[in-house]
Amino acid sequence: MWTEITRPQYLRKGLRYASDVTEAEWRVIEPHLAAPKLLGRPRKIELMAVVNALFYIARTGCQWRMLPRDFPHYSTVQRYFYAWRDDGTLEQINFELLVQAREAAGREPSPSAGVIDSQSVKTTESGGPRGYDAGKKVKGRKRHIVTDTIGLLVGAEVHSADVQDRDGAVLVIEAIHSLFPWLRHLFADGAYAGQKLHDRLINFGAWTVEIVKRSQPAAGFEVLPRRWVVERTLAWLNRNRRLAKDFEASIASAKAWLFIASVQLLAKRVVRT
């Protein structure tokens, strides 16, 4: 909510672009990036500039070659993107900032309950794995995310859109179950109902899935308990035009941009709390 007290927290005055990190946000992100190597050519590029370039691309949706000259050369930014994507740096930063944001909010570092949902998005001529979601009539990929109960991104996976939600849920739970040992309860919609999902989750511990159903008499829009949290998170992520469609040729890159968008949100939240 915008008030005279909270408005200054969102101002980006003095920055070249609205997507640039502030000094306070950079102090939150920098410790989780690799230090310069002792051997080899000294690093000449400032990592803050690389992070700003990635946030700019995520926010505006521009192509690599359209990156403004204010940033390092696009090939340099691209090289760091692929390196951080492949070695898990982006996911690790998201994890560390999530823990900081939860502790700053007076919560336990590891959530005990989460909310799961998926979003089908169209792909482009870039190619790569894709399928057809008959329910939403979308040819492309499906983003599966799990948030905590306040809407912070806990985990994400990307797969072709023809994979059912019950099968896609297993992928994201497999990725997060060891990171969050206390997270064993999920709120979900009717697409995750049934014994099939329950049987597959046994391999990852004693998970329970609570289905939040829509009331029968309701007509039109209805705010559903718990489920609105993950829907809001998807809306937050979709503010980044790079996520308007899936422009990536690989699943790994599509997933990496989700975590870049989440890190941008978490850094702001940690600084404000």
Image (cartoon, rainbow, N blue to C red):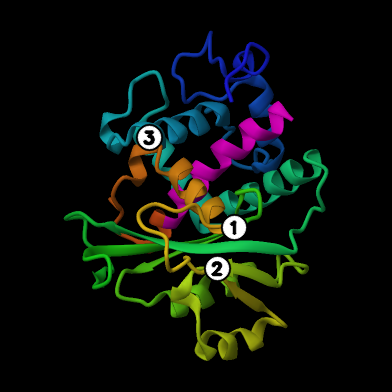
Magenta stretch, residue numbers: 255-273
Q: Residue at x 75, y 46 (%)?
A: 102
Q: Are marks 1 and 2 in contact (CB under 8 Å)?
A: yes
Q: Secondary structure at mark 1?
A: loop
Residue neighbourhood size for the residue with mark 2, other residues' Cα within 10 Å, grouped as few (<14), some (14–19), many (≥20): some
What residue is rendered at 60% in x and 15% in y?
Answer: 7
- Return the residue at label 1: 226
Examine the structure image and report whether residue 92 is included in the region drawn in magenta. Answer: no
What is the CA distance from the residue labelled 2 to the residue labelled 3? 36 Å
Residue 49 x, y percent position in the rendering: 51, 26
What residue is disc 2 on?
212
- Near mark 3 (Cα within 10 A), the count class, few <14, some 14-19 or many ≥20, is many
Magenta residue check for 262: yes
Q: In the image, is residue 66 above or below residue 257?
A: above
Q: Earlier in the sequence, mark 2 or mark 3?
A: 3
**Which image quarter holds the C terminus?**
top right
Mark whose residue sits in front, 3 or 1: 1
**Amino acid type for the residue under numbered disc 3:** Ile
From the viewer's side, name the closer residue of 104 and 89. 104
Q: Amino acid at mark 2?
A: Val
Nearer the camera: disc 2 or disc 3: 2
Task: Check residue 57 in the rendering and tell me which mark sits there, or answer none.
Answer: 3
Q: Is 35 drawn above or below residue 132 in the view shown?
A: above
Q: Are marks 3 and 1 in contact (CB under 8 Å)?
A: no
Q: Residue at x 44, y 18 (%)?
A: 17
At 30% from the left edge and 75% from the top edge, which residue is drawn? 162
> Quarter of the image holding residue 237?
top left
